[in-house]
Image (spheres, rainbow, N blue to C red):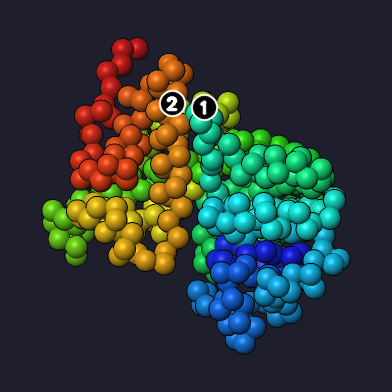
Amino acid sequence: MAVITIIGSGMMGSALAFPARENGHEVRIVGTHLDRDIIETSRATGRHPKFEKDFPAGISFYQIEEIGDALPGTDVVIGGVSSFGVEWFAEKILPILPDGMVVLTVTKGLMDTPDGRLITYPAYWQQKLDALGKKISLNAVGGPCTSYELVAHDQTEVSFCGADLEILARLKEIMTTDYYHISITTDITGIESAVALKNGYALGIALTIGLNQKEFGEDSPLHFNSQAAVFGQSMKEMYRLLEFQGAMTLNNLAVGVGDLYVTVYGGRTRLVGILLGRGLNIDEAEAELKGVTLESLVVARRVARAIKINAANGTLDAADFPILMHIDEILTEKKPVNLPWEDFTYAEQI
């Protein structure tokens, strides 16, 4: 039996308590400073306030100031913060973890640098660890998985990535169930880039839903031609960006495209994309969705900035990324949605 401490009681971190506890491991969930109500509710009811199913029996819940009681004896820390908590996790959690700790993070996203590079969150955290002189194994989860469907035991395929295959194999042994299936890879950049990039493109696909609702009415049937057109172009752009990251493989592309699919149909990004497509500007859409974490907006802006820098120095061609460049215009210049459909076409002689 392993002792697993989940730090961050958001939906995805909490969802991983289900396979972990169902496999007989001791599970402790620690809320962040923003999670006080979640922890209180979970303690009182045995259920996360966003889930429709009770936690497995035997899970312990802690407020952030009680983290000192939760960490002793821990074998694996699962980082359950959103991308907005990346710096908090680096400043408040990594320094208090003992050397040798194994960390598995569910946080998806990329950071951009002034010279146009895109850095994964594990790479960012590793820089912090190196500065502290700490030795911690950083691993991450990627793939098409929504929290509520994991809780419902829908068949789910994900990838765990990290530097050490033996540690990854142990994590797979701890977490695998008859509904949670895990591939393992040492390609951290590939998996983390793929699952981050899909956020911006899921927003692009959702724009078409809003555009059709604007034209045909909010109760009109869904139109799939336009969604498929943006989906196909999104795959091309993700392919090029994975190449830029030095991480273009069939497995990485499949993880990213699968995650793109599930995000379009089941994620928060869908909501903001629909509102933008209906005609709201980004300020109005964010106000409408007040309180909803919109990581897709952060990723889209960061990747677009990196593309512009690399286009300026000749490394990339911005014309190869018409969807992301238009999303950037919508987010940073508040331009109305006007998808560049003709830019998706090509002429090929074979």
**Is 207 located above or below residue 174 in the figure?**
above
Compared across the picture, whether 137 is left or right of 7 comes to right
Helix, strand or loop at mark 1: loop
Q: Amino acid at mark 2?
A: Ile
The residue sitting at 39% across, 28% down in the picture is: 308
Residue 125 image point, x, y percent: 67, 45
**Res. 287 image quadrant:** bottom left
Query: Looking at the image, can residue 188 be seen?
Result: yes
**Res. 252 image quadrant:** top right
Residue 54 image point, x, y percent: 60, 80
The residue sitting at 23% across, 34% down in the picture is: 340
Compared across the picture, whether 270 is left or right of 30 comes to left
The residue sitting at 58% across, 36% down in the picture is: 119
Helix, strand or loop at mark 2: helix
Please report contact status of discs 1 and 2: CB closer than 8 Å, yes or no: yes
Q: Nearer the viewer, residue 347 or 137?
A: 137
Residue to which mark 2 is pinned: 309
Quadrant, the C terminus = top left
**Is 77 located above or below residue 238 in the figure?**
below
Residue to which mark 1 is pinned: 115
Compared across the picture, whether 14 is left or right of 298 comes to right
Compared across the picture, whether 131 is left or right of 182 comes to right
The residue sitting at 61% across, 36% down in the picture is: 189
Quadrant, the N terminus = bottom right
**Is 131 located above or below residue 54 in the figure?**
above
Q: Amino acid at mark 1?
A: Asp
Q: Nearer the viewer, residue 254 or 81?
A: 81
Query: Looking at the image, can residue 232 be seen?
Result: no
User: Which residue in the rendered view is the most extreme toward the bottom?
Assistant: 44
**Res. 118 image quadrant:** top right
